[in-house]
Image: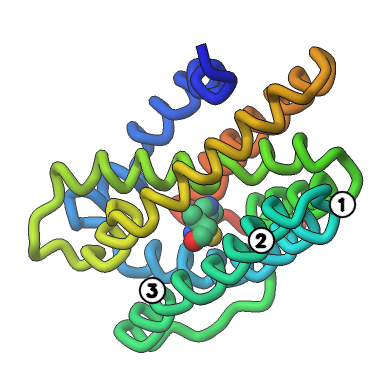
Amino acid sequence: MKFTEQLWQDIQPIYDSILKHGFVAELSAGNLPNATFQCYIQQDALYLADFARALNQLAARSATPDDMLQFTQFAQNAILVERVLHETYFALYAIQPETVKMPACFAYTNYLLATTALQSVAVGAAAVLPCFWIYRQVGKHIYQQASQENPYRAWIDTYAGDAFDQSVTQMLAITDQFAELASPSEREKMRDAFRLSSRLEWYFWNDAYEQNRWLV
Ligand SMILES: Cc1ncc(C[n+]2csc(CCO)c2C)c(N)n1
């Protein structure tokens, strides 16, 4: 079994919870309240800036030019591809940019920045992988069910599309390569990192859905 297949097995219950979550279910049905989606997009803009930084840290710390190229390309795409999507919705709903991260966004971005700076590149790669992989699986899942009239169609099409599919496949291949070279204890750290980021994906959607705020 490939290492990444094992990673997915580990998070199957988390992934099931994501699919069952009200945010994903309502996004798929097209009846997610607009205010909830707007809040998500605002937070996601903050997330993406740090996600690109995390990928650039992996690029800077890569041992081979090929890995460096991959991570810088992922970082560029995180900004370019997602910016198109965000600009569409920022303009459509006249969304104002937000500057304050909600708890999940704060936890997730700081976790990614710390992990990609301080842990090995292999562990850092495992930490950024759920962002790619879970979105592909969720995108494809929703795509099968969503109608053409779904107001969140641009979001769904981005993540269910071929261009994104290819980048996820590349990210999976890189992670499997790192795992082959890693010691058993480092592979354990990779599994932990993958699981933690997967959890934080659930929390990210949940914060927008619950309009979670800092209580103190
Ligand atoms: C919380 C959160 N997690 C994952 C993504 C998806 N995503 C963000 S950047 C990137 C890589 C290149 O496009 C991907 C797949 C998101 N938007 N928001």
Left or right, 96 with reference to 112:
left
Point out the frontmost of discs 3 and 2.
2
Please tell me the numbered disc located at residue 55.
Answer: none
Residue located beneath label 2 in the image: 69
Name the residue located 49 percent from the left edge and 16 percent from the top edge: 9
Residue located beneath label 3 in the image: 85
Provide residue 81's location: percent of width, then percent of height: 45, 71
- Nearest to the observer: residue 197 or residue 37: 197
Residue located beneath label 1 in the image: 117
Name the residue located 50 percent from the left edge and 76 percent from the top edge: 80
Residue placed farthest to the right in the image?
118
Provide residue 129's location: percent of width, then percent of height: 59, 41
Upstream in the sequence, badge 2 or badge 1? 2
Point out the frontmost of discs 1 and 3.
1
Circle 2 crowding by C-alpha within 10 Å: few under 14, some 14–19, many from 20: some
Provide residue 64's location: percent of width, then percent of height: 78, 50
Q: How many labels does the image show?
A: 3
Q: Is mark 3 on a helix, strand or loop?
A: helix
Left or right, 205 with reference to 114:
left
- Name above or below for residue 52 compared with residue 212: below
